[in-house]
Image (cartoon, rainbow, N blue to C red):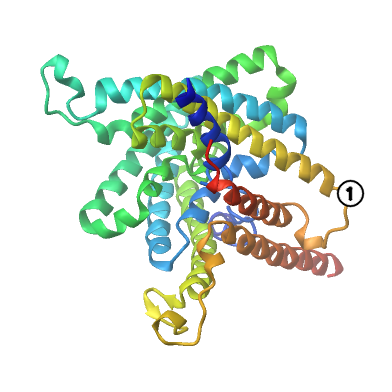
């Protein structure tokens, strides 16, 4: 039961992006279309699960005065491996994502979970927490990317959904959705919905 | 001289890391509830950027770049894939030092920054500054100016944002939108504004 909570809580209730405010930069930068967002999500889940487990295993022997450097080294090694894997198996994707795979190192979800969870819990709980937070992050990323791709270009995963004017259709692409600022508005509205939902369930629980 | 003031101007306004490249957002949104804390964090970012960008410049140009190790007899060695881990090492070491100094001399500031001071290590604005410095091939003096400029730009953005948020506390906002939701939307508007500066030349 307790372990299930570690996995499920971060998905909506304690979502890393909308509730904990962690890991925003990449959420804004790679969400112009869906495919890069998917690749990014998988990369983040892998790195997060790996780093959480390793840091939790080492938590008793890491001296606290140099823990930051040690944690960053573990995370950076995982990211370099993921980066090289993407470069080898999907070189085109790696060009689209450019520096943002490298910037997973500085994605604060990863250090944030390491500091606040993995350094005080066992390896199994940390693994589940890592996967749960990764999924919570991915859900929001995929949602934002879907909205931006459909309304910005009229396509989804490269397939035409709304036939754009430029190729003889009826849909005028919304250029605003191509600007990074649009992700803020979508995220803002997402947060609004999630928070209203959470408040409502809280009130219901009290009445019960 | 004109070169470096040009670089600073660009880094502060037209290529602001926070509002144009959207880097360092987590700290930006979380530590902007009041102007005083935001200002403290902004100063810490300026300090860390001004020191790390030039240090990383030296490391990259003299140890990691392809052909950089010619003086040691390895003219073909290309260690640039190690840049990520060495930049992060420098940043983490410097942040931890700043943390210790602050705890000793500015305990009030240290307490109010909380977990976000160690999280400066993973502030993408700081790593991003170093990565852009590599990408643009600056000289050493230019990298000092650039480090200072991006730090200043980031500090400016967070102070403006904190001031707006302080004002917003007194307005009536729909319940679910309070706090983070509105913060996203305000940042979106600010970011649109800074995008409008992009045509400016010094």
Tell me which corner region of the image, top left, top right, bottom left or bottom right, holds residue A123: top left
Q: How many marks?
A: 1
Question: Does residue A181 lie above or below A21 as drawn?
Answer: below
What residue is shown with label 1?
B170
Query: As drawn, which residue projects farthest toward the bottom?
Result: A169
- Residue ID at (45%, 34%): B127
Tell me which corner region of the image, top left, top right, bottom left or bottom right, holds residue A169: bottom left
Query: As drawn, which residue projects farthest toward the top?
Result: B105
Question: Does residue B148 lie above or below A131 as drawn?
Answer: above
- Residue ID at (69%, 26%): B40
Name the spot of residue A12 as percent of width and height, x first: 61, 62
Which one is nearer the viewer's eye here, A178 or A14?
A178
Using residue A116 as the reference point, say whether residue B167 is left or right of it.
Answer: right
- Residue ID at (32%, 32%): B83
Using residue B64 as the reference point, say whether residue B154 is left or right of it.
Answer: right
Name the spot of residue B12 as percent of width and height, x first: 57, 35
Q: Residues within 10 Å of mark 1 (few under 14, many from 20)?
A: few
Question: Does residue B186 lie above or below A199 as drawn?
Answer: above
Name the spot of residue A85 as percent of width and height, x first: 25, 51
Name the spot of residue A2 as percent of width and height, x first: 58, 55
Using residue B4 as the reference point, say whether residue A204 is left or right of it.
Answer: right
Could one spot residue A206 in this view of the protein? yes
- Residue ID at (64%, 29%): B42
Check disc 1 and report its element: helix, strand or loop. Answer: loop
Question: Does residue B97 lie above or below A21 as drawn?
Answer: above
Which one is nearer the viewer's eye here, A20 or A202?
A20
Chain letter of disc 1? B
Could one spot residue B93 in this view of the protein? no
């Amino acid at each position: 039961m307790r372990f299930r909570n570690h996995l499920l809580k971060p998905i909506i209730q304690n979502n890393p992006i909308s509730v904990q405010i962690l890991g925003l930069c990449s959420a804004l930068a790679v969400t112009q279309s869906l495919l890069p967002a998917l690749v990014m999500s998988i990369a983040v889940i892998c790195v997060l699960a790996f780093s959480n487990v390793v840091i939790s295993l080492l938590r008793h022997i890491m001296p606290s005065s140099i823990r930051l450097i040690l944690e960053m080294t573990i995370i950076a090694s995982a990211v370099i491996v993921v980066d090289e894997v993407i470069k080898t198996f999907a070189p085109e994707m790696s060009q689209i994502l450019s520096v943002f795979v490298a910037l997973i190192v500085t994605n604060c979800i990863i250090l944030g979970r390491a500091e606040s969870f993995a350094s005080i819990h066992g390896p199994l709980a940390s693994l589940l927490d890592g996967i749960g937070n990764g999924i919570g992050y991915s859900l929001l990323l995929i949602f934002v990317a879907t909205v931006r791709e459909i309304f910005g270009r009229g396509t989804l995963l490269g397939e035409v959904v709304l036939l754009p004017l430029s190729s003889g259709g009826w849909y005028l692409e919304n250029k605003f959705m191509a600007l990074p600022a649009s992700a803020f508005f979508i995220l803002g509205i997402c947060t609004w919905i999630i928070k209203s939902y959470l408040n409502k369930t809280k009130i219901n629980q009290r009445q019960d | 001289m004109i070169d470096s003031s040009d670089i600073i101007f660009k880094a502060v306004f037209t290529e602001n890391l926070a509002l144009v490249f959207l880097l360092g957002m987590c700290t930006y949104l979380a530590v902007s509830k009041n102007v005083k804390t935001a200002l403290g964090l902004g100063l810490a970012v300026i300090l860390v950027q001004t020191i790390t960008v030039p240090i990383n410049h030296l490391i990259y140009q003299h140890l990691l770049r392809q052909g950089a190790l010619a003086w040691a007899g390895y003219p073909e060695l290309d260690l640039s894939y190690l840049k990520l881990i060495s930049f992060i090492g420098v940043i983490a070491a410097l942040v931890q030092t700043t943390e210790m100094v602050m705890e000793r001399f500015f305990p009030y500031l240290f307490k109010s920054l909380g977990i976000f001071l160690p999280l400066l290590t993973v502030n993408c604005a700081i790593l991003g500054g170093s990565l852009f410095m590599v990408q643009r091939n600056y000289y050493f003096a230019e990298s000092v100016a650039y480090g200072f400029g991006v730090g200043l730009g980031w500090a400016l953005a967070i102070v403006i944002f904190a001031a707006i948020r302080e004002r917003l506390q007194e307005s009536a906002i729909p319940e679910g939108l309070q706090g983070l939701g509105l913060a996203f939307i305000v940042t979106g508007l600010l970011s649109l504004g800074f995008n409008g500066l992009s045509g400016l030349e010094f």
